[in-house]
Amino acid sequence: MKSTRFCVAVHTLVALAVKGGEFVSSEAIAWSVDTNASLIRRLMSSLQRAGMITSQSGVKGGAKLAMKPEDITLLDVYCAVEDKTRMGVHSTNPKCPFGDLVEDQMTVILAKGHTEFERVLASKTIAQVAKPAIRRVKRAARS
């Protein structure tokens, strides 16, 4: 089963970046993501613990960014909302003549893959992801 928590959290942060400093309700973000507001609130809780957003209760409540979008990397978001468990290597039968070779090679391959994955996420920010969305919203507002 694939997890969409990371992508939904990025979508949430992009929605907040598009709105600038305004508070945005979990219901509005849930509409944008096409999901349940309770899922958005759970993700917002993780994002708030990580210091990326702040929230306010009440009629004009909701969430807004607590950091500049250019200071939030996708790796920061991933670490805030996803289980940090890496893909693991299985144990092999000690009597298998090649099992240890598969295990050793897969350990190296997975470590390199995870390192590259983190490098790519660390090189991108919410501001970069939000830039086309902000442009589209501004263009629509002028029309």
Image (cartoon, rainbow, N blue to C red):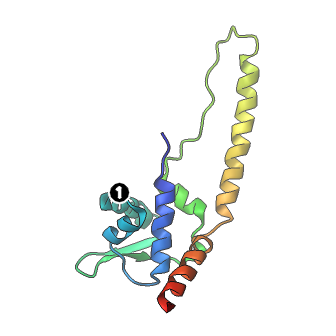
User: Circle 1 — which element?
Assistant: helix
Residue 62, visible in the rendered structure: yes
Viewer-proximal residue among 110 and 49 = 110
Left or right: 34 with respect to 61? right
Left or right: 9 with respect to 112? left
Q: What residue is drawn where x is 64% and y is 17%?
A: 92
Residue 51, visible in the rendered structure: no
Considering every residue shown, the one lying at the far front of the view is 143
Q: What residue is drawn where x is 50% and y is 77%?
A: 17
Q: Position of residue 14 (x, y in %)?
A: 50, 71
Question: Is disc 1 surrounded by few (<14), some (14 to 19) or many (20+) residues within 10 Å?
Answer: some
Q: Position of residue 26 (x, y in %)?
A: 33, 68
Residue 87 in the image: above or below residue 139: above
Q: Position of residue 77 (x, y in %)?
A: 53, 61
Q: Label 1 belongs to which residue?
A: 39
Residue 89 in the image: above or below residue 99: below
